[in-house]
Image (spheres, coloured by chain):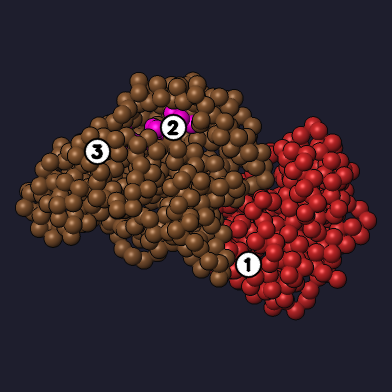
Chain colours: A brown, B red
Amino acid sequence: MIRPNEEINEKKLLRALVDGKLPDASGRFGPFGGRYVPETLMPAIERLTEGVHRLLPDESFNHKLTSQLKEWVGRPTALTHAARLSKAWGADVWFKREDLAQTGAHKINNAIGQALLAKELGATRIVAETGAGQHGVASAAACARVGLPCVVYMGELDIQRQSPNVDRMKRLGANVVSVNSGDRTLRAAIDEAIRDWVSDPVDTYYLLGSAVGPHPYPFLVRELQAVIGREARSQLETHGGLPDAVFACVGGGSNAIGLFHGFLGEENISLIGVEAGGRGDDLGDHSATLGSGRPGVLHGAYSLLLYDDHGQIQETHSVSAGLDYPGVGPEHALLKLVGRVKYVTAKDSEALDALQECCELEGILPALETAHAIAGARHWASTNQGARILIGLSGRGDKDMPILSQYPIKTNDTEGAENAAA
Amino acid sequence: MLPHEALKNALEKSEESALVAFLTAGYPEPKNFLNVLYDVSEAADAVEIGVPFSDPMADGVTIQRSSQAAIEHGVSLSWILDQLGSRTIKSNTPLLLMSYLNPLLAFGFDELASRALQVGVSGFIIPDLPYEESMPFKTSLDKVGIALIQLVTPATPSIRLNEICQASQGFVYAVTRTGITGSATQFPADLADYLAAVKEAAKVPVCAGFGVRKSEQVRMISRHADGVIVGSALVEALERGENPGEFLRNLRP
């Protein structure tokens, strides 16, 4: 925790992070992280931590994971040169194509890894939460693949705005439970998944979908998503070299942490996380946790959070269900504290424009979450002409069609895009 | 006498098994809070005042509902402290605050500890603050002698159970089964062994609960523990508009 008057040695913390020494034994990334869970869950969390440290480095486990990633997920995913966007922005733009992974988003990297882990640890049942539905779909698919029953908690509001994914989850054999408590979005879905886990901590495995939650989840999810950054780095190295800047959208922050980890040690590469700026700057109108949050505890971790003066967690807004969350992974909170990653926002309207431009110029329909990263990169490119930019294309946007149908198509020609960026 | 010692004594001096009651602050009506609190205090040996939180992840539907309603009525930690500070008639029954960690963090640990002392709070129970993470807040509470009550569950391994019991002040909160508050009323078959182990390890009284609804259950648990905790069932009685004092007196064996 951050204590008043405590001195934070930023350089030392960043060094420790780059050297792979964080989280520490107590599950902390500097002041952030930890395990703030009911006592009932502590033995389960201890067992999970032990399992993670034993299995992640284990050769036979890695062999299983790698072959699933290759044969079933479809890794390595492509690195795509975005030639027409590059021209429009006056930059050299590359996409790391997680939208091409099985189920259409980076979420599958984590879901299959944790499903294999759950199987090894003897779980008989999986629970998961989902916001946009991508983690729910990935969990349902991964559970089918390894042969475990799966329950997905999803907020009532998200069920309405991401209906194609609800049908996919059901088709893949998951039991989708609608959550009508709390804010009826991702936050309430996590509360409910934790309640389920508290009720049966021995046989149930909680397959958490983002780099949030109590230790070891932020570590586990990062390790499973780090494949994105490793691949992107080696692909770029054989396609003209490392980038000047790397962009990823940040909700809980799993695709961003996975992508950024490939480049953390390269101090001359700018790492930029893009949060949901929503419809305005007032509390409740956005989900910019890193931009305007304060340290606090939610869902098992001490991290940056959006809450009011009484400590009540704030409802958030974003056009993108996957970014509509008042917390963020503790490692991002540290990366912000030490200044290694810069966090910016893109508003709903900017994300929608970026999505349209990407459709028209690259023939790729990105997820609304991903569109925030593209919008952030577009803005940055306007003052960094000629720069080499890597964007984490975290997922595809088919699931967003019900929302997109509410926004008429604004046709952008190339010149229009240039004007908008200026 | 320090508040945590007074709490311990109050639970020990109860001739029968002690009754610890939980109510959500300001529920159902904020304006009746002090009256309800007084009635409950007169019928119980200690009272847990629930600070409502937006994300009560260890609670079942009853406390979720009451917390949500209280928040909507403007109940907050500072409101609760102000109300307690404004009491003109005080019961001698020790008062505890039960809260998730974030409202406490938002208030500030040191400031909260001294304010809690001023308004007569004897202890804190924090469902999302396990023993490992408790040091920063405990340091603040220790300065004023307020108890940090630790929780153990039937799943807590014995070495850990010993450590937690040693550290707990006021009493040890023995959760009687895994799960969220207020759900199923079936207790584990080895409840007696479990509570005996907790009593063996604890230096302070052991109060047990989670899902206690009926007087037979109170009687059963009181054979193995120094006190019985009643939470969701009391909140439901408040919800139904029953007199909380009478409800508690009827629960006593």
Tell me the element at label 3.
helix
Q: Quadrant of the C terminus of chain A?
A: bottom left
Determine the chain carrying the residue at label 2.
A
Measuring 86% from the left and 71% from the top, which residue is drawn there? B1
Residue at numbered disc 1 = B109
Q: Position of residue A353 (x, y in %)?
A: 19, 51
**Which segment is the magenta one?**
A104-114
Residue at numbered disc 3 = A236
Tell me the element at label 2.
helix
- Tell me whether marks 2 and 3 sit on the same chain: yes
Measuring 10% from the left and 47% from the top, which residue is drawn there? A87
The amino acid beneath tag 3 is Leu
The amino acid beneath tag 1 is Phe
- Viewer can see residue B250: no
Q: CA distance from mark 3 to mark 1?
A: 49 Å
Q: Is residue B252 left or right of residue B61?
A: right
Determine the chain carrying the residue at label 1.
B
